[in-house]
Structures are given as structure tokens and as C-alpha cells.
Amino acid sequence: MIARLFDYTFLGNTLGNYFLIVGIIMLAFSVKRFMSRHIAGLVFGLVKRIANGVDKKSFVDLVVIPLEQFLLILITIIALDKLHFPDLLNVYVFKVRLQRIIEVVAIVILIVSLITLMLRIIEFVAIILEEKSQGSGKASENQLILFFKDFFKAMLVILGILMALKFAFNFKITSLITGLSLAGAAIALATRESIENLIASFIIFFDKPFTTGDMIKVQNIQGTVEKIGLRSTRLRTTQKTYVTVPNKQMVDSIMDNITLQTQRRAFVQLELHPETTHDMIHLLTGRIGELMQLNPRIENHTVFLADIVKGAYIVTVEYFTATIPATDFNELRQAVNLSIIEMMEDLGVRLANKDGGEVKV
């Protein structure tokens, strides 16, 4: 009786086949966690060389859910493929048979789950490399990891699309690539600026004129580099605004990496009144020089009569400090300027302007 029941045909398949397929799917659902953790452990063994300091559980927890989904979808598709699709249900939908639509949807879902799993593995590898770079204290390596993580993610998405076109829609990839190459010139012209920015991003990462965290100045924009992307670089300006600069401009423009400067420079130009005597100028420059020598923050300096012009004697004061914070540097400049003003008042030295003139800094 039971044998006859299993031999009963419904929608082109026996009940025995239906029970078998349902049993396989239920078994896969019940053991998917065990299978995924075991496979994740095997995959971890392949990447453990770069996983120093990170336990196996971190990797398994990261990939186990997408791996479960992929295994369940794969086993379900393989099992259902053993059934005969009922002719009664194989109707046309927009001139396409329902069986073909279901096959395409199933393949696309399988490819999406596979790409999701690969993206998780890339995330894990990126986490490991980021922790290593943080341990070494090199911000450039950390930014390089983020860059290539995004790059490989984009490549995986493109690969997934090509796989879907190949296996789901039966596109000939070689013919497709050949056809795209004909339109490549037009696309390249239309996206020339984006391609140039992408190439410039590679130049930045390998030439390393600056890294994340550097204070730079480019095209009259000064700020701290917060992120270097595939197309642009993000700066947090001194006014606390967030500026996006195309990478091509970062490469082609004259860029000043302020973080790499060895000293901070201050410059003062005094335009002295033409009635100032030789002795007063000599005494003033001498006292300013002594002021510079006595200040421990000033590493080197020059004070001299730079020029004699109509209506003024030009005295130039230039000094350098270590790369101290900007706030401390501005406080030092103010202290030096106030001391120079006090010296001029004591000596009775006037500026060329009868109203008091100005000190050019």
C-alpha cells in the first residue's frame, strides 16, 4: 500500500520523488549550521597565514550566515532540478516559459549568495590587515587596505554580473566583451575624467605624496586628509568644512604637505621712518637678534636691514621654530611682535607711516 502511494504520480512526478526532495531540503536546513561552520573552519585554514592574532571564531562568525544561505540555496536548487517541471504549469509569461523564468531566478539567487559570501571573506581579510597596519602605526598602509578592499568589492560585483549574464541568460561573455570594446572608446571619452581620477588614486597610493591624517594645502585649500577614495580625496579644512577634491587635481596641482615640514617659518617686515639713524637701526636689529637667541623655541633666525627705499628703511625679521602646534606657534608670533613693538617704543623708532604704520607678517 505504501509502495503504491509512493508510486502515485502528481504533476509529472511521483510522490516518492517529492518526499525525497523535501527530505533532502529539510536535512540540509537542519545541518546547514554544522556544515557551514565546518567549511568556514577549512577556509580559515587557507587564510590563517595572514590571520595572526585573530581567533578562528571571528572568521566563522563573519562568514557563517552567508555560507549557510549559499549552501541551502545550492542544495535546494540541485534537489529541485531532479524533478520534472509539470507541463501544466509551464505556461508562457511575456513570451517566456515559466520554467525558464524560475531557472533564471534560481541561478541569479545562487550567484548573489556566492558573491555575498566572497564579500564577507574580503571584509575579514581587510579587518586582519587593518589590525596589522594599526599595530605598525602606518596610516598609509591602513588607507591602502581600505582602497583595495573597495576595489576588490567592485571587481566581485562586476564578476557576479558577468556570471549572471553567462549562466542565467546564456550570454556569450566573449562576444559581449568584444561588443563592449567597440563602445569602449565612446565610454572612455564620456568618463575620461573619472578614469583619470581612478588612475590618479593609484598614483597617490603608490607614490604616497600624502597619507590619511596629513595636513596639506592644494589650490588654496588647506585641511587634514580624512579619506582617499577611488575618485576623490576628502579634506577637513581649517574652517572645519568637508571638501572633496578630485584625485587628478591632487596629482596635477602643486601640493604642500604641511605635516612633512621640518620647521615653521615666521616673517616680519618693518618699514622704518627715513629719519631713523644708523645707530638706532643697528641697536634695534641687535636687540631683536638677542630676543631670538634667548627664546628656546626659536631654532634659527635672521635680522638685517634688507633694503633702502624712498621713504623707508626695510628691516626683515625671519625666524624658524620646530613643528609645534599651530596654537603655540601663533602665541609665539604674538609674543615676538609685542616685544619688537616694545623695543621700538623704548628706542623711539617710528614706522614710515606717520599714523603708526603697519607690521607686515
Image: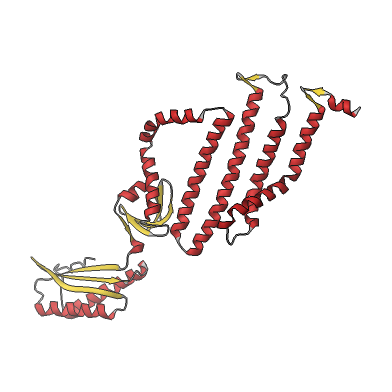
Indicate whether 200 appears above or below 296.
Answer: above
Query: Observer-nearest residue: 257 or 67?
Result: 67
Residue for point 43% across, 46% down: 230
Vertical placement of 118 versus 108: above or below? below
What residue is at 52 percent from the left and 57 percent from the top?
Answer: 130
- In terms of depth relative to the viewer, which is nearer, 227 or 49? 49
Picture coordinates of residue 119, whole percent (x, y): 56, 46
Relative height, residue 297 to residue 58 (above, below): below
Residue visible at 21% across and 71% down? 317
Query: Which image quadrant: the C terminus?
Result: bottom left
In the rendered image, is residue 242 in sight? Answer: no
How is the rendered protein coloured? secondary structure
Corner quadrant of residue 59:
bottom right
**x and y percentages locating residue 242 in the rendered image:** 41, 52
| Front one among 112 and 71 | 71
Image position of 145 (left or right of 193): right
Examine the rendering and report whether any part of residue 26 can be seen: yes
**Residue at point 34% right, 50% down?**
250
Which quarter of the figure is the N terminus placed in? Answer: top right
Image location of residue 43, percent across then percent down: 62, 50
Counting every numbered tag in the picture gives: 0
Quadrant for residue 262, please give it.
Answer: bottom left
